[in-house]
Structure formats: structure tokens, C-alpha cells
Image (tube, rainbow, N blue to C red):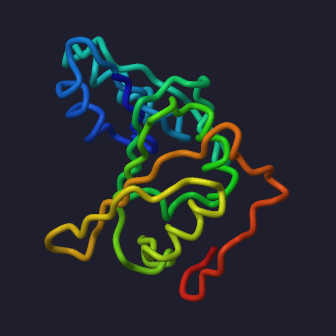
């Protein structure tokens, strides 16, 4: 199994995923900040984690190889994506058939470092993703939303994606 840690940052989840999917699985730590990936590469080398790969993306494109991921996680970072429709559109080809995308965020406006669940649903649905499940997390108003990517035949053209309204955020 190959899991993508999208927006890996310092690698908190990358390291934990590496142990979980070992020995046969791998983790792709993806981020748009080169310095984060350089530091994470040093850290994984020190920890002797040989099943972690690195991918430098762009704000509108994670730049991952086609059909390379069985699953992807985006933890407390979805609200940071400036171009969510382009990002989600460009993420879809990297996801294998049957893959799942798990998004953890807070039920807060995007301007307050969260993503209202209804906005998340609208944005992913607009690109052709389908909601599989949503779980309320204990404590801070967080949630885990799980989606399946659009099937190749059902993938929308970028010009057919209709933007959602974000009445309380900044998108």
C-alpha cells in the first residue's frame, strides 16, 4: 500500500504512517515547500525509514505520478489550499482505482484555519469526488471526511467545475 501524506510539512504523520505500512508499504510525503521536504528527508534518514519518498508540488498541483497512491491524507491543511478545485482535479489521476482520500480539518471558517464540512463536501463533489463517510472527532470540533476520487470516465473537465460559495471564509 502506498499512502500520500499531502501537505506533509514537518512529517508528523509521515513518520507514523511509515511504521504503519512497513515493511511492504510506502509513504509519499508531498508538500509545496522544498525546505520542509529537505528537513523531513534528513529526519527519515536518521530514523532509518527507507519506505518514504518525497514529492514537491505546486499550490494548484500535487505533482504526483499517475495511479501511484492507494490512499491520501490531508490533515489540518485543506483550508490552506488556495486553488482547491485545481488541486483536487490534479490529485485525482494519482489515486488508484478504489483509493480513498481522508481529510481532517476543523469545523471553522477558512479564514480561521478550518473548513466548514458543507464547503468541503461542495468543493470535492464539484470536482467529482464522492463522500464515503464522515466522522466527528472528539474535542476540538474536528472531523475526518473520507472521499473516493472520480472515476476516469466521470472526471469533469476543468471548465465544467462550478465553484462553491464560501460565505464566511476567504476563498
Seen from the viewer's position, the closer of residues 44 and 23 is 23
Q: State left or right for residue 134 relative to residue 85.
A: left
The C terminus sits in image quarter: bottom right
Among all residues in the image, which is located at the extreme bottom? Answer: 167
Of residues 129 and 166, the one nearer the viewer is 129
Q: Is residue 38 left or right of residue 60?
A: left
View extreme (right): residue: 159
Q: Position of residue 146 (x, y in %)?
A: 38, 54
Q: Residue at x 45, y 59 (%)?
A: 131
Q: Is residue 47 left or right of residue 167?
A: left
Quarter location, residue 113: bottom left
Up-down: is 110 above or below 36?
below
Seen at 32% across and 64% down, the residue is 134
On the image, the x and y values in percent for residue 105 come to 36, 64
Q: Looking at the picture, does residue 19 appear above or below residue 150?
A: above
Residue, far front: 153
Q: Quadrant for residue 117, please give it.
A: bottom left
Q: What is the quadrant of the N terminus in the image?
A: top left
Q: How many marks?
A: 0
Residue shown at 39% from the left, 56% from the top:
132
Q: Residue at x 35, y 29 (%)?
A: 40
Place of residue 143 in the rendered image (x, y in percent of width and height, measured from the top left): 30, 66
Residue 78 at what x, y percent from top left? 48, 58
In this rendering, is residue 96 above or below 5?
above
Amino acid at each position: 500500500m502506498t499512502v500520500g501524506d499531502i501537505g506533509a510539512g514537518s512529517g508528523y504523520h509521515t513518520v507514523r504512517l511509515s511504521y504503519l505500512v512497513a515493511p511492504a508499504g510506502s509513504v509519499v510525503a508531498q508538500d509545496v515547500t522544498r525546505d520542509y521536504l529537505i528537513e523531513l528527508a534528513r529526519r527519515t534518514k536518521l530514523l532509518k525509514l527507507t519506505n518514504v519518498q518525497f514529492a514537491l508540488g505546486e499550490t494548484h498541483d500535487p505533482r504526483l505520478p499517475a495511479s501511484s497512491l492507494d490512499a491520501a491524507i490531508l490533515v489540518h491543511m485543506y483550508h490552506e489550499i488556495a486553488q482547491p478545485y485545481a488541486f483536487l482535479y490534479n490529485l485525482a489521476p494519482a489515486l488508484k482505482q478504489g483509493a480513498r482520500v481522508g481529510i481532517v480539518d476543523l469545523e471553522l471558517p477558512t479564514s480561521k484555519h478550518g473548513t466548514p464540512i458543507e464547503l468541503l463536501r461542495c468543493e470535492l463533489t464539484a470536482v467529482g469526488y464522492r463522500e464515503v463517510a464522515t466522522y466527528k472527532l472528539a474535542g476540538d470540533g474536528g472531523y475526518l471526511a473520507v472521499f473516493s476520487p472520480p472515476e476516469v470516465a466521470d472526471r469533469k473537465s476543468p471548465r465544467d467545475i462550478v465553484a462553491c460559495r464560501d460565505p464566511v471564509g476567504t476563498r
